[in-house]
Amino acid sequence: MGKQLDWKTFIPAFEYCTDNAAMIAITAYYKYLNNDFADLGISPAARAEW
């Protein structure tokens, strides 16, 4: 379907696809560097509402 719609698809190597914790950690690292902190009153949610 991607070829039919002329989409450019990137599929990383398997070793880069197995650990969501690493993706969360790098995001947290950059948020920390930018002093981008959440309010202490925030509640966790399994499904984000953008």
Image (cartoon, helix red, strand yellow):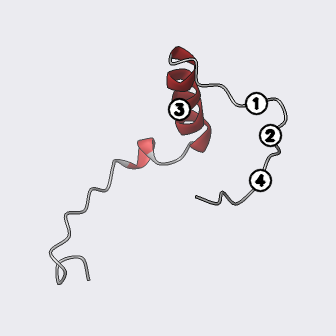
Q: Tag 2 or tag 3, which sits nearer the N-term?
A: 3
Q: Is residue 34 above or below residue 4?
A: above
Please tell me which residue lies in front, 1 or 34: 34
Among the two numbered marks 1 and 3 on one chain, the one whose residue lies closer to the N terminus:
3
Q: Which mark is residue 6?
A: none
Q: Is residue 1 left or right of residue 22?
A: left
Kind of element beneath mark 4 = loop
Name the residue rendered at 66%, 57% in the picture.
48
- Mark 4 neighbour density, 10 Å: few (under 14) some (14–19) many (20 or more): few
Tell me the residue at 52%/15% (across/down): 33
Quarter occupied by residue 21: top right
Circle 3 — which element? helix
> Residue 16's x, y, as percent?
43, 42
Side of 26 where 21 appears, left or right: right
- Frontmost of labels 4 and 3 is 4
Q: Which residue is the site of mark 2?
A: 42
- For the point 17% across and 84% down, which residue is it? 4
Q: x%, y% of residue 11?
A: 31, 56
Identify the amino acid type marked 1: Asp
Q: Residue 50 or 14: which is nearer the viewer? A: 50
Please give the label number shown on residue 39: 1
Query: Mark 2 and mark 1: span between their CA atoms?
Result: 6 Å
Measure how far apart labels 3 and 2 are at the Cα level: 18 Å
Task: State whether residue 7 is above or below residue 21.
Answer: below
Q: CA distance from mark 1 to mark 3?
A: 17 Å
Mark 4–mark 2 Cα distance, whole angstroms, equals: 9 Å
Q: Which residue is mark 3?
A: 27
